[in-house]
Amino acid sequence: MQRGLEKFIQKDLADKIVLVSGPRQVGKTTLAKGLFSSFEYLNYDSIEDRLLLMKREWNRNVSLVIFDELHKMKKWKSWVKGIFDKEGSNPPLIVTGSARLNTYRKGGDSLAGRHFLYRLHPFTLKELKGQMSVQEALSQMLRVGGFPQPFLKGSEVFAKRWRKTHSDIILREDLLDLERIRDIKGIEMLIALLRVRVGSTTSYASLAEDLQISIPTVKHWIQILENLFIVFSVRPYHRNVARSLLKEAKYYFYDTGAVMGEQPQKLENLVACALLAELHFREDTQGEDVELCYLRDKDKREVDFLCVVDRKPSCMIEVKWSAENFDPALFHFQKFFKDLRGFQVVYDIKRPKSSHGVHLIPVQDFLTDMNI
């Protein structure tokens, strides 16, 4: 399957170091190896490759050099900077990694002016358009999620086995690489609680009570799960919305197959993943400032998602498993924003329709177009 970032990365490699972050096993290495016909791949976890890195003796007669897990090297940013300053893009350099590489972008930047960072997400319907049936892809994502291995395999049993191994590796390797956490069982219990609360506002007090820990610890653990690309937050939009309140965040899983709930919850998670992937794509390729939020006011009127681009609300999206009529909240919030488009995306739909700038359409049509 061709990934949507490929041509953008190929273009940037001509004069920049490219960093590719994303969840473990989302396809970063496969993407990198597929960019050019010849490449040198070096994984810092391999002793043989590590020796080549230390001696700087890798093959330069290739179209691309790939450094994987390089963030585990001390002062790796300064090391890569030295390579690039001396050799430039001859050959081009790409660095791939997951949790630690993503947290790097939030800190100091010793690679300033020398790199672009991309975030790779699980498959989306827009990305798969033209490569397989849209309806087949949608059905498969709801069953097993969008991560490449379980998605391409298409087996729910395989997906469950893959998910267990995937989770074990993250919590027993990546977690220890980021934090000194002893209570791994507590983290696992937190994940289990979040899996059944997808799409609901998160009560940190309730989670703290269930886990018998403090509220600050709950917030810290959830931040760790975000850094590990297990969950992501969708927070309330509260600027210039009359009578709005700053409510607690909702959390969704990068792996839709991990959601424990009914089909409507899985569909909402799938849409959340697609929206985040598209917004990150626009930020990473166009430099736009993006944000994924939800809308809610004191009267508990709510819309599932609001896409904000360059600090301006762009469109709002309400997700329904089945519906024939518009959700009134879409028209209510539309009054507070100029030119705000509204979409009610539905899985089981009889007839698409539009009214006053709000569109009721099949979810697969919205996700393959993603005009947000």
Image: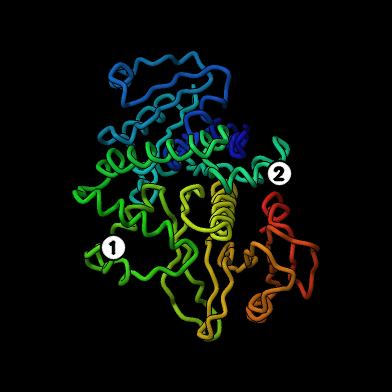
Residue 148 is marked as none
Q: How far from the left and from the top, in percent, is residue 14? A: 55, 30
Residue 218 is marked as 1
Q: Residues within 10 Å of mark 2 (few under 14, many from 20)?
A: some
Asked whether the viewer can see residue 16, the reply is no
Residue 278 against residue 148 in the figure, above or below: below
Where is the C terminus found, in terms of image quarters? bottom right
**In front of the other: 321 or 337:** 321
Amino acid type of the residue that numbered disc 2 sits on in the rendered structure: Val
**In front of the other: 219 or 363:** 363
Residue 197 against residue 191 in the figure, above or below: below
The residue shown at (57%, 33%) is 152
Look at mark 2 in the image and give the residue it sits on: 134
Of all residues, the one furthest to the front in this rendering is 157
Please, which colouring scheme is shown? rainbow
Q: How far from the left and from the top, in percent, is residue 42? A: 39, 22
Amino acid type of the residue that numbered disc 1 sits on in the rendered structure: Val
The residue shown at (25%, 66%) is 216
Could you tell me which secondary element the residue under label 2 belongs to? helix
Q: Residues within 10 Å of mark 1 (few under 14, many from 20)?
A: many
